[in-house]
Image (spheres, helix red, strand yellow):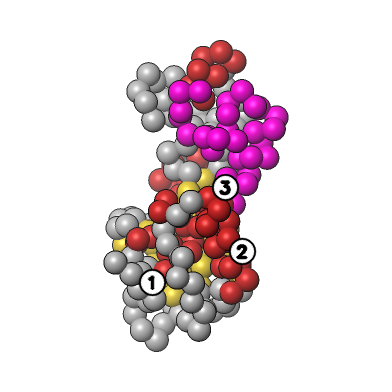
């Protein structure tokens, strides 16, 4: 199924999506994107459905060709304070705050959202599989977050964040048992559960 260009024809719409909600460590990231309707890229898709090489290429294309784009983050400490759902919404708000052109409508991936001031929104379940601007937002959120996790992995190589991006893989969980948590871990999460992630 091909992705749609817009939800409501004639409106300037912002696609929003997040990355990193289920991770044990690191911030949650969100992207906000207003695509240029005159620009097309056949590879544009949900970040989970394209490989790393394609995601990285799409990030460059989006950042060059979108009418406006931004990325917002919420730290692990903030996640512990307000919970991951609210943190995901806050990351989206922080991304939207940075957009430098006027828009009419927000398209949000998922089924819930904290209303952005003075702007209507529509929540779309699996929106990153349905709309190009949400897919673009998912690409930016994922690639920017992965880049950050690569950076902090250099200080904490045992957690294997350079490969697991902070998710609770076996290697990550084994490192937690061996050396414990660090300042990047989400302490409100059940980090020592035996359940596989």
Residue at horizontal 51%, vertical 68%? 33
Question: Residue 24, image x and y in percent?
Answer: 49, 32
Q: Label 3, secondary structure: give it.
A: helix
**Where does the N terminus fall, quadrant-wise?**
bottom left
Q: Nearer the viewer, residue 114 or 160?
A: 160
Circle 2/circle 3 CB separation < 8 Å: no
In primary-sequence order, the first of circles 2 and 3 is 2
Residue corresponding to mark 1: 120
Residue 103 seen by the camera: no
**Residue 87 counted in the magenta span:** no
Residue 127 is situated, as x and y percent measured from the top left of the image, at 34, 61
Q: Is residue 70 above or below residue 36?
A: above
Please determine whether, in this image, residue 84 is positioned above or below residue 36: above
Task: Give the overall secondary structure of the magenta segment.
Answer: helix
How far apart are labels 2 and 1 at the CA level? 29 Å
**Marking on residue 89:** none
Local packing at callout 3 (Cα closer than 10 Å; few below 14, some 14-19, many 20+) is many
Where does the magenta region start and end?
A: 144-171
Q: Position of residue 74 (x, y in %)?
A: 55, 46
* Rendered-image quadrant of the C terminus: top left
Q: Which residue is mark 3?
A: 145
Question: Neighbour class for label 1 at 10 Å: few (<14), some, many (≥20)?
Answer: few
Helix, strand or loop at disc 2? helix
Q: Position of residue 124 (x, y in %)?
A: 31, 62
Residue ID for mark 2: 60
Check the image and name the residue furthest to the right. 155
Q: Give the alpha-carbon distance from disc 3 to disc 1, as whole Å.
A: 27 Å
Q: Compute the Cα span from label 2 to label 3.
A: 15 Å
Mark 2 vs 1, N-terminal side: 2
Helix, strand or loop for disc 1? loop
């Amino acid at each position: 199924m091909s992705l749609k260009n817009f939800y409501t024809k004639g409106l300037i719409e912002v696609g929003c999506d997040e990355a990193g909600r289920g991770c044990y460590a690191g911030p949650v990231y969100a992207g906000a994107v207003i695509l240029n309707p005159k620009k097309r890229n056949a590879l544009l898709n949900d970040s989970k459905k394209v490989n790393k090489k394609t995601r990285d290429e799409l990030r460059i294309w989006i950042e060059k060709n979108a009418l406006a784009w931004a990325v917002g983050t919420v730290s692990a400490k903030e996640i512990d304070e307000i919970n991951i759902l609210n943190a995901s919404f806050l990351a989206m708000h922080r991304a939207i705050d940075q957009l430098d052109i006027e828009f009419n409508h927000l398209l949000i991936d998922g089924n819930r959202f904290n209303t952005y001031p003075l702007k209507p929104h529509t929540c779309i379940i699996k929106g990153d599989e349905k709309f190009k601007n949400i897919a673009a937002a998912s690409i930016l959120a994922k690639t920017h977050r992965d880049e950050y996790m690569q950076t902090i992995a250099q200080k904490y190589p045992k957690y294997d964040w350079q490969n697991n991006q902070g998710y609770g893989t076996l290697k990550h969980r084994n490192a937690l048992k061996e050396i414990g948590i660090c300042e990047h871990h989400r302490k409100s999460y059940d980090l020592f559960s035996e359940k596989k992630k």
